[in-house]
């Protein structure tokens, strides 16, 4: 389990990384999610974040919702999120297992579940619970890595004992194991979303990672990856992109 210090260090590392590719991959996702929160939040409504990590999105949620609840299965992660600082009083922290949630039916106007379901063995149960506790017509923002993206496949090697030390030497900044135990293809995730009574109303994919190019060519390499991302998106090869995003709406009763 990552400590608060490790989470803070990692957050600085990925969003302010000296490596252009690493910084681009993560800041792109952050911008996408912040834009989605701003676009789909309901003034005066309620929002839920599942698995807040270091609390990165809580200030944005708190600005756009009258009430924000954040849940995690581990109390230590909730305590760490509380330490993110400058959080308004409308943010509430609860211990909860999203695969068997204690939250009531039809409670939230907006639910954010970003980079979480890959850490949950039974993601279909988590998505069904999201569908249950979301209000009819409510919005769930869901993001997760793609199963066969080069970054995820390379990570399986990069995090092997011994090799991870070489990776840390190359990047010279915090590198922590991802803990991804349930990577999904687009088709698998869409099936689980549909089974949760959620309808995809918007989707996207971002992020190209090319081994060695990312590590050793700096800004020129990142620009090549960005151009390749544009070329691949919305084609039969977009499974190569790292992150998949879904804006979903719960069907009205």
Image: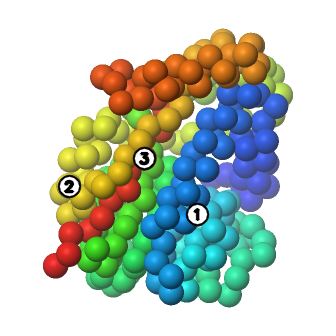
Q: Position of residue 31 (x, y in %)?
A: 61, 50
Query: Mark number for residue 245?
Result: 3
Tag 3, which secondary structure? strand
Q: How far apart are the two marked residues, 1 and 3, measured between alpha carbons? A: 17 Å
* Residue ID at (42%, 59%): 141
In the structure shown, which secondary structural element does the residue marked by tag 2 occupy? Answer: helix
Q: Residue at x 28, y 74 (%)?
A: 137
Location of mark 2 (residue): 194
For the point 31% across and 78% down, which residue is it?
135
Q: Which residue is mark 1?
A: 52
Q: SS of the residue at dot 1?
A: loop
Residue 144 in view of the camera? yes
Q: Which of marks 1 and 2 precedes in the sequence?
A: 1
Residue nearer the viewer, 79 or 21: 21
Earlier-in-chain disc, 3 versus 2: 2
Rendering quarter of residue 109: bottom left
Q: Is residue 159 above or below residue 53?
A: above
Q: Are marks 1 and 3 in contact (CB under 8 Å)?
A: no
Residue 41, placed above or below residue 125: below
């Amino acid at each position: 389990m990552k400590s608060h210090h490790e989470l803070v260090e990692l957050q600085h590392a990925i969003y302010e990384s000296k490596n252009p590719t690493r910084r681009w991959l993560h800041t792109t996702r952050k911008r996408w999610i912040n834009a989605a929160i701003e676009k789909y939040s309901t003034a005066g409504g309620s929002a839920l974040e599942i698995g807040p990590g270091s609390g990165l999105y809580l200030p944005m949620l708190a600005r756009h919702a009258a009430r924000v609840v954040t849940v995690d299965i581990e109390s230590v992660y909730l305590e760490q999120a509380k330490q993110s600082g400058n959080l308004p009083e409308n943010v509430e922290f609860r211990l909860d297992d999203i695969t068997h949630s204690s939250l009531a039916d039809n409670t939230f106007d907006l639910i954010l579940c970003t980079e979480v379901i890959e850490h949950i063995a039974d993601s279909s149960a988590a998505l069904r619970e999201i569908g249950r506790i979301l209000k009819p017509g409510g919005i769930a923002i869901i993001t997760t890595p793609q199963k066969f993206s080069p970054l995820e496949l390379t990570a399986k090697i990069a995090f092997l004992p011994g090799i991870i030390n070489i990776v840390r030497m190359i990047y010279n900044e915090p590198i922590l194991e991802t803990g991804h135990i349930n990577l999904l293809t687009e088709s698998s995730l869409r099936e689980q979303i549909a089974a949760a009574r959620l309808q995809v109303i918007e989707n996207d994919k971002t992020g190209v990672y090319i081994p060695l190019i990312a590590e050793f060519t700096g800004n020129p390499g990142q620009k090549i990856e960005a151009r390749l991302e544009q070329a691949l998106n919305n084609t039969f090869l977009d499974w190569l992109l790292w992150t998949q995003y879904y804006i979903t709406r719960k069907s009205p009763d």
